[in-house]
Amino acid sequence: MQRIYASSPEEARKMKYLYHHSGIETRHSVVPDYNLPAREWTFYSPTENLEPFPTTEQRMQWYNRCAPELGLRAIHACLDGLEEPAAITHLITVSCTGLSAPGLDLQLMEALRLPTSVFRSSVNFMGCYAAIHGLKWADAICRSEPNARVLVVCVELCTLHFQSEATMDNISSAMLFADGAAAVLVTADTDPRKGFRLEQFHSEVSLQGKKDMAWDIAQTGFRMTLSGYIPDLLQADFASLVDRALTRAGLRRGDIRHWCIHPGGRRILDALGQSLELPTGALAHSYSVMRDYGNMSSPTLLFVLKRIREALADDDDSYIFAGAFGPGLTMETFIASVV
C-alpha cells in the first residue's frame, strides 16, 4: 500500500495513521509477494506501478490453486477427532472471492474422497454474512434429514483483489481484508462434547445502504465499495433488528451472554457495541479476531465463534447471538444455545 498509494510523505503519514488505528496487527495472504522483494514476486509485475496489473483471469487461476488447499486445512482441523470425511452427507462451500465451474465444491469432494453421490452446493458472492447463510441451509437440511452430516466450508482469498487506484474504497479494503478459511460440522443429533444448538435465524436488508457496501467484478479482479457511512447505518439499524430477532425467539438482550459479531472493522464494532449498549468486554472475541487476522469476509464469524467455544465454562448453558453484514446492506443473524 505504501508503494502504490503513498504518492508523497504526507500520504505516507496518512497511511500509517490509518493502519495504527485499524485495530489490526496481523493478516495472512496466499500471495507471497507482499513479504518479498520485487525481484522475487510471482503474482505482481516487479515494476513501479505493478503494470501490467494482474487480470481477473490470473487472479482466478491463483484462487483455483490456493483455495482448495486452504479449505482442506480448515476441514481437517474441524473434523479432527470428531468425524471421518467419509461420513459427510452434504457439502456446502461458501466464497465470494473466486468463481469457476466445476469449482471449489468439486475440488474438495475429490480431495476428501467423498462419495460421488454427496450433496454439493455453493453459497457465492454474498460477502461477509455468507457463513450464516450456509449455516441456515445446513440447519434446514438437518431438520429434514435426521442422519445428515453437513460440512460448511468458507474460503476467502481477499488479498488476490488488491486494486492499484488510490480511492478510499480501495485503500479501506486493502487495509481491512485478508485471506482465511473455516469449516463447521452441522448434524441433527446431539453430541456429548461441548458445542452449540442452532435455535433460530433472522435476516433483514437495509436498502438505504445498498450502495454503501457492494462487490462487483472488474477487469483487474473483484472491486469493493466500502463507504465510511456503514458504521452509522449499522448503528442506526442493528439494535432494532436484534430486538426483533430476540422477540421472535422469546428472548431479551439480558438473556444473551455471548455476542458473536462479525468484525467488519474497528469503527463497526465500536458502533455496534454502543448501539446495543453492551458492557465493556462483550465483543472481546470479535476484537481479538480482527486484531490477529483482519477481516477475512465469510470465515471471520466462525473464527469468533470458535474463540467463544474455547472460552466456555463447563457449566455454561447460555445463549449466543451472532450477527454479520454485507452487500445489500444485508444483516444476517442467528441465536444458538450452548450444549
Image (tube, helix red, strand yellow):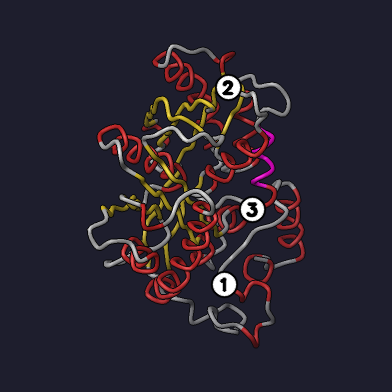
Q: CA distance from mark 3 to mark 2?
A: 29 Å
Amino acid of disc 1:
Val
- Front residue of this view, candidates 162 and 308: 308
In the image, residue 100 sits, relative to residue 201, either above or below, namely below
Which secondary structure dominates the residues rendered in magenta?
helix
Residue 87 lies, in percent from the top left, at 36, 52
Give the CA separation, mark 2 to mark 1. 42 Å
Disc 3 target residue: 293
Q: Which residue is mark 1?
A: 31
In the depicted structure, whether residue 90 falls above or below residue 319: below
What range is drawn magenta here? 283-290
Say which residue appears at 40% left-offset and 55% top-offset.
96
- As helix, strand or loop, the secondary structure at mark 3 comes to helix
**Vertical placement of residue 262 versus 59, above or below:** above
Residue annotated with mark 2: 317
Q: Was residue 141 drawn as part of the magenta stretch in this picture?
A: no
